[in-house]
């Protein structure tokens, strides 16, 4: 694509724009651009070359910078660029926008609070004094699990949480019972269970108080995807698509069920044809889904009707809905199909707009947009019975399935249009180069009518437009006008009238009306408004103001991804909200960049947040921006408003602590999680609705003693306070919410920036990669927030060496700092093991040894042990003969063998955090640790709140994938790893005992012979291919442990135990 970055830039390396067959000087071949050069508009440029006008006037801000892109002009920092010719293409980014020091405050927040259910709130609506939040809702109880316990209170909503009651102690709760399904049905969900368990859920909340009032649920077998919601007076409309069946209770007390048209003969959805609802390849296979629309009573949730529409042999959905004052429902969406039902053939998707009758839902008219890949959102305008919609020419988001559209000069475009609500006829269309795609978990923008005080305008938000530089908004269908009969000059419609769509009767005498569809109509480019998107480098979305009768673009503003927009009732401003993820681009608003919130033990690349911002309707200039978050899956998917100007954030998160901004910081407790097991972030995803109270006068933040110019640049900050990123903090308050517990507010150093805590950095922590890391902690990576951590083998926090960078362990090098663990480290040529730790050879073993499956019964190579000379070394450097600490009171013992030795394997471990002054211990699930009672238990049984030997309290348990697998044996049978007393042994039974006898005692007795041989220097170390010591009869022992207890085994065990008790010394 000619406009996309950074992905498109990569594509252009293999697919150049139209060009001659001869290679240009900057082309190494047909698919590669030479380093240090750019290939833009079929011309070659050297790094530093500036864009030129046709008259050779140089741009002040656009230049070739191959480090940023080789296929589009890069924009200098501090500038924005437009589509105008140089030197009129550049303007400095303003430094006084988005910085008002009087801002509104959040009034309340309401949450779901049980782990037995999960809700992804995706869409909202307001009617009267009620706010509605709709989305995916499911019970997490798996009926396919025999151990699952049903409850009548799967889903609980609690609220409000307020400044005066931040923990919700006085909150109202409502609960509902949900239908439970097998987690094996449908597309697997990484967060647990499957998408096939989801129903349609709507939460009703009192808009004034935040009290939860009711929950409406419509469900059935298979995925029910909720995407659209509208509310008007006493009715609501809901839309989406479904894969199996969907049932509603009707207002007359009966029920109605609709069935997907692609069900198997047994009436069930084909489980092989269920897909994640946000399939990355939207143009590819995404399942066989049909659409639905429900119109229901807003008081009871009972349906007036349900419609099965559209029906398709591939994928179909009503994405957005709205209603008119007569109760008719309008839907926008798409319908995909394959020719003849051939499942292998590529699918073809068309956009659709449809009108459903108020009384029974029958289709009154349907407009198929065959040059669209999908329609997104829709808005009804009662003032002139018109509809406005958004859409895209590509369902999948790439040129792979983009449609040819007469108004689109690019490979794909975002589309806005006006349609007659009476007939479905298209009246105008505007396009902008970009590649928005439909995906329910994408922020796919919004469309809203301007308030009457603002004028006859609409506001449209698009994702993925202008990503590759400035793009004009003067594109789409032609303009109507009045043609002068004498001169032939045409006056465009937007100069004839801005209060209506002009007709022939509106043209003055001596002129002739020219319809927008006539051959001589004025092309959209003739408007030359200069309005554009893509002027800000790195922006992901664009907010656009159009004249509603003509489609004339007024202005466009680049912003981070947009989830929802709400024009203010007084017409002066427009509220915009969304969520940002730092690894995808910083949330920048002109010169203001928002901080990223980060969960405990998160990576800096996982920082995210929610924003709410206000812009002037006159010119799109930013007034202020607020940020919110807790650091764990901060997601906002819609913004809705009421008649008083209040706006409501709708979304979900995995936060227990949520900083909404200003004075509202809430702490939510999961109702069914024991307090002793609670963690910093939530166990489950919880929906939220929060109210930004715009009806009250904006306030000056509490730590500001003055706000003379109305801008934060001129404020006076109170003593003993900081004002950082437009938020007040008391002296000593830390930046923990942002992953920087080693930073704090220190007014003596700075009142506007976080200050390093000298009592932590260089003492107990390093500050590296924009996060605070405990001493001894290794660098790690994580593919997703839910995935296991993968640790480096050589990059560690060593405060004695470098408190602000990773220390590379001796014997290793890191050739490229961009390479992530576990492949970041390269062992030096002279760092090979000298044989003391084993040669890894497999000699075939004796008759008692069977091939082991590895099992991961060990510690990771990153685990830290202490030698007798007080040296701390990683487990991978431990050798036979070393003396290591084995008890809390400082005793040391000799390593005589390794039960498992596999340096190159990446194994799955439990990472157990505790109050020990060390990095968490990474240990395999069956390996045993000692509790404070001196009892050895498998690590798999350890939970938050348990007390380990020495009084260390477990604070967190998570999964981790780490390089290396080691199981050292000492003569005492114990070893201290990362400050925690651990056993040398595993529990093959998964419990702490066998036949009522401690596993530690049994295991230590079983290897007595091996200890004796090694003490006489008669033992030899050899390992299987899986790293298991060949002298260990691993499979035999596992088989015995798994058998039912029989007389024969009891006899053998009794003999072994009797012998052992004569020899056993008291351990520990």
Image (tube, helix red, strand yellow):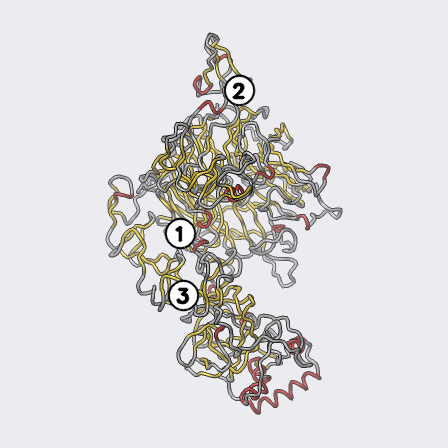
Residue 130 can be seen in this image: no
First along the sequence among labels 2 and 3: 2
Say which element carries label 2: loop
Say which element carries label 3: strand
Q: CA distance from mark 2 to mark 3?
A: 68 Å
Numbered mark located on residue 191 in the image: none
Q: CA distance from mark 3 to mark 1?
A: 34 Å
Q: Is residue 615 above or below residue 919?
A: above
First along the sequence among labels 1 and 2: 2
Instruction: Give neighbour class at mark 2: few <14, some 14-19, many 20+ (Cα, 10 Å).
Output: many
Residue 189 is left or right of residue 883, and the answer is right
Residue 435 is left or right of residue 1025, and the answer is left
Look at mark 3 in the image and give the residue it sits on.
Answer: 807
Report x, y in % for residue 669: 46, 58
Look at mark 1 in the image and give the residue it sits on.
Answer: 659
- Is 1061 or 880 nearer to us in this picture? 880
Q: Is residue 211 above or below residue 421?
A: below
Q: Is residue 149 above or below residue 972?
A: above
Eye-nearest disc, 1 or 2: 2
- Is 280 or 1020 nearer to us in this picture? 1020
Report x, y in % for residue 921: 48, 70
Eye-nearest disc, 3 or 1: 3
Whether label 1 touches label 2, CB < 8 Å: no
x 64%, y 87%: residue: 1054
Look at mark 2 in the image and give the residue it sits on.
Answer: 516
């Amino acid at each position: 694509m000619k406009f996309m970055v950074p992905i498109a830039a990569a594509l252009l390396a293999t697919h150049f724009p139209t060009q001659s067959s001869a290679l240009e000087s900057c082309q190494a071949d047909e698919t590669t651009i030479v380093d240090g050069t750019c290939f833009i508009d079929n011309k070659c440029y050297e790094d530093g070359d500036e864009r030129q006008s046709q008259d050779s006037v140089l741009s002040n801000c656009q230049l070739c910078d191959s480090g940023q892109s080789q296929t589009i002009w890069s924009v200098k920092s501090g500038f924005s660029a437009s589509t105008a010719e140089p030197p009129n293409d550049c303007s400095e980014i303003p430094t006084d926008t988005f910085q008002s020091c009087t801002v509104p405050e959040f009034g309340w927040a309401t949450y779901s609070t049980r782990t037995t259910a999960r809700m992804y709130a995706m869409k909202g609506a307001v009617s009267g004094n009620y706010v509605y939040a709709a989305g995916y809702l499911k019970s997490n109880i798996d009926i396919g699990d025999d151990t699952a316990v049903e409850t009548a209170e799967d889903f609980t909503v609690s609220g409000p949480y307020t400044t005066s009651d931040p923990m919700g102690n006085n909150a109202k709760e409502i609960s509902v019972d949900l239908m439970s399904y097998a987690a094996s049905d449908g597309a697997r969900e990484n967060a647990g269970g499957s998408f096939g368990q989801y129903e349609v859920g709507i939460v009703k909340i009192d808009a004034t108080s935040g009290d939860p009032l009711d929950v409406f649920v419509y469900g059935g077998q298979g995925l029910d995807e909720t995407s659209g919601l509208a509310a008007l007076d006493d009715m609501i409309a809901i839309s989406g698509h479904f894969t199996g069946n969907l049932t509603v209770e009707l207002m007359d007390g009966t029920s109605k069920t609709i069935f997907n048209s692609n069900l198997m003969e047994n009436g069930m959805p084909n489980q092989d044809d269920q897909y994640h609802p946000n399939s990355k390849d939207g143009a590819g296979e995404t399942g066989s889904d049909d659409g639905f629309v429900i119109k229901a009573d807003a008081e009871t949730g009972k349906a007036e009707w349900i419609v099965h529409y559209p029906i398709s042999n591939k994928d179909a959905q009503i994405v957005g809905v709205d209603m008119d004052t007569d109760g008719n429902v309008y839907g926008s969406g798409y319908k995909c199909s394959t020719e003849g039902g051939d499942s292998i053939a590529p699918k073809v998707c068309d956009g659709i707009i449809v009108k459903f009758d108020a009384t029974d839902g029958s289709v009154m008219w349907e407009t198929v947009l065959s040059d669209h890949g999908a329609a997104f959102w829709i808005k009804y305008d009662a003032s002139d019975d018109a509809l406005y919609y958004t859409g895209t020419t590509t369902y999948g988001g790439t040129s792979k399935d983009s449609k040819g559209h007469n108004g689109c000069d690019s490979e794909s475009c975002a589309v806005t249009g006006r349609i007659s609500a009476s007939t479905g006829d298209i009246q105008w269309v505007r396009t902008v180069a970009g590649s928005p795609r439909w995906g329910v978990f994408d922020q796919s923008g919004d469309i809203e009518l301007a308030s009457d005080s603002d004028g006859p305008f609409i506001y449209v938000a698009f994702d993925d437009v202008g990503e590759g530089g400035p793009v004009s908004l003067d594109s789409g269908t032609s303009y109507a006008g009045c043609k002068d009969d004498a001169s032939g000059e045409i006056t465009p419609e937007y100069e004839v009238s801005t209060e209506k769509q002009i007709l022939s009767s509106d043209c003055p005498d001596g002129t002739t009306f020219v319809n927008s569809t006539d051959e001589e109509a004025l092309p959209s480019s003739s408007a030359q408004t200069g309005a554009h998107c893509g002027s800000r480098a790195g922006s992901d979305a664009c907010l656009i103001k159009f004249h509603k009768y003509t489609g004339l673009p007024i202005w466009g503003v680049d912003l981070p991804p947009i989830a929802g927009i709400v024009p203010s009732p007084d017409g002066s401003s427009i509220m915009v909200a969304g969520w940002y993820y730092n690894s995808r681009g910083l949330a920048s608003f002109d010169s203001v960049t928002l901080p990223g919130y980060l969960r405990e033990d998160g990576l800096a690349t996982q920082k995210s947040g929610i924003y709410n911002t206000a812009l002037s309707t006159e010119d799109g200039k930013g007034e202020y921006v607020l940020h919110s978050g807790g650091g764990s899956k901060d997601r906002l998917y819609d913004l809705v408003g009421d008649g008083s100007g209040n706006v409501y954030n709708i979304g979900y998160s995995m936060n227990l602590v949520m900083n909404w901004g200003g004075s509202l910081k809430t702490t939510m407790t999961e109702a069914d999680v024991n307090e002793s097991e609670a963690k910093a972030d939530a166990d489950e995803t919880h929906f939220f609705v929060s109210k930004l109270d715009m009806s009250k006068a904006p306030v000056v933040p509490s730590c500001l003693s003055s706000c003379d110019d109305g801008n934060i640049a001129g404020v006076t900050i109170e003593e003993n306070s900081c004002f950082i990123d437009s938020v007040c903090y008391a002296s000593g308050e830390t930046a923990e919410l942002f992953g920087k517990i080693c930073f704090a507010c220190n007014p003596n150093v700075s009142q506007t920036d976080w200050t390093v805590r000298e009592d932590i950095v260089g003492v107990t922590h390093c500050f590296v990669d924009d996060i605070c890391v405990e001493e001894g902690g290794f660098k790690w990576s994580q593919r997703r927030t839910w995935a296991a951590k993968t640790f480096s083998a050589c990059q560690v926090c060593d405060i004695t060496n470098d408190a602000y960078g990773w220390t590379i362990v001796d014997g290793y090098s890191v050739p490229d700092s961009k390479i992530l663990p576990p492949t970041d480290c390269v062992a030096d040529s002279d760092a090979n093991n000298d044989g003391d730790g084993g040669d890894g050879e497999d000699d075939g073993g004796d008759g008692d040894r069977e091939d082991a499956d590895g099992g991961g019964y060990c510690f990771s190579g990153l685990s830290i042990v202490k030698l007798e000379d007080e040296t701390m070394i990683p487990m991978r450097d431990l050798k036979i003969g070393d003396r290591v600490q084995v008890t809390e009171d400082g005793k040391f013992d000799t390593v005589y063998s390794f039960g498992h030795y596999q340096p190159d394997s990446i194994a799955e471990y439990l990472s157990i955090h505790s109050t020990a002054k060390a990095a968490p211990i990474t240990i395999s699930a069956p390996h045993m640790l000692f509790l404070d009672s001196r009892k050895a238990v498998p690590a798999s049984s350890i939970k938050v709140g348990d007390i380990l030997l020495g009084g260390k309290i477990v604070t967190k348990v998570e999964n981790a994938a780490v390089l290396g697998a080691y199981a050292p044996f000492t003569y005492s049978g114990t070893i201290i790893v990362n400050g925690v007393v651990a056993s040398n042994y595993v529990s093959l039974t998964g419990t702490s005992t066998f036949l009522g006898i401690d596993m530690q005692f049994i295991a230590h007795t079983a290897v007595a012979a091996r200890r004796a041989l090694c003490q006489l220097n008669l033992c030899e170390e050899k390992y299987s291919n899986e790293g298991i010591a060949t002298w260990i009869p691993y499979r035999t022992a596992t088989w015995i442990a798994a058998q039912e207890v029989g007389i024969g085994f009891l006899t053998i065990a009794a003999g072994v135990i009797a012998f052992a008790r004569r020899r056993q010394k008291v351990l520990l």
